[in-house]
Image (cartoon, rainbow, N blue to C red):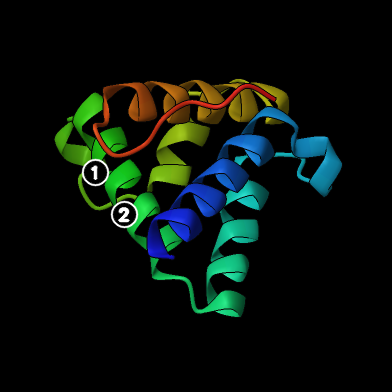
């Protein structure tokens, strides 16, 4: 049961990253707010664990000392030129994170 739930929830992360407008998501901040609300509403530790691992991944990609205590959504915003680019960047980083992971797999939507 847990593996199906894990797959289902990570599939949702990928779907929202690839088609954010379907969920009225306009920028990286609203992307992260969407999943914070989703994980609280479902009491879903799988999504929380995914985003903790993803945050660690983003911090490894940007190891500057001044970014050590900054949330990953703020780091993505810092390296983005506008809202649209921030969503492209989060999608790219999630795909890269999943491709390097042994736990998750990339889905096509």
Is 83 left or right of 4, judged from the image as shown? Answer: right
- Residue 101 is situated, as x and y percent measured from the top left of the image, at 27, 31
Instruction: Name the image quarter holding the N terminus.
Output: bottom left
Q: Which residue corresponds to the image point at 70% horizontal and 31% vertical from the top-left?
A: 83
Residue 88 vs residue 40, the one in the foreground: 40
Q: Which residue corresponds to the image point at 26% horizontal and 35% vertical from the top-left?
A: 57
Q: CA distance from mark 1 to mark 2?
A: 6 Å
- Residue 105 is situated, as x and y percent measured from the top left of the image, at 41, 30
- With respect to residue 88, does 8 lie above or below? below
Instruction: Name the image quarter holding the C terminus.
Output: top right
Residue 70 vs residue 37, the one in the foreground: 37
Give the residue furthest to the front. Answer: 1
To which quarter of the image does residue 25 belong?
top right
Q: Secondary structure at mark 2?
A: helix
Q: Which mark is residue 56?
A: 1
Q: Which residue corresponds to the image point at 34% horizontal and 42% vertical from the top-left?
A: 54
- With respect to residue 86, does 37 lie above or below? below
Q: Secondary structure at mark 1?
A: helix
Q: Which residue corresponds to the image point at 21% horizontal and 39% vertical from the top-left?
A: 66
Mark 1 near mark 2, Cβ–Cβ under 8 Å?
Answer: yes
Is 94 left or right of 32, judged from the image as shown? Answer: left
Give the residue at mark 2: 52
Is 99 left or right of 109, judged from the image as shown? Answer: left
Circle 1 crowding by C-alpha within 10 Å: few under 14, some 14–19, many from 20: some
């Amino acid at each position: 049961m847990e593996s199906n739930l894990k797959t289902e929830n990570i599939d949702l992360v990928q779907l929202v990253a690839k088609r954010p407008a379907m969920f009225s998501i306009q920028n990286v901040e609203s992307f992260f707010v969407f999943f914070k609300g989703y994980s609280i509403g479902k009491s879903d530790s799988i999504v929380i664990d995914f985003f903790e691992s993803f945050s660690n991944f983003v911090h490894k990609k940007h190891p500057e000392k001044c970014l050590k205590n900054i949330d990953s959504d703020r780091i993505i915003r810092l390296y983005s030129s506008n809202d649209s680019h921030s969503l492209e960047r989060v999608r790219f980083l999630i795909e890269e994170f999943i491709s390097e992971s042994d736990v998750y797999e990339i889905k096509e939507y």
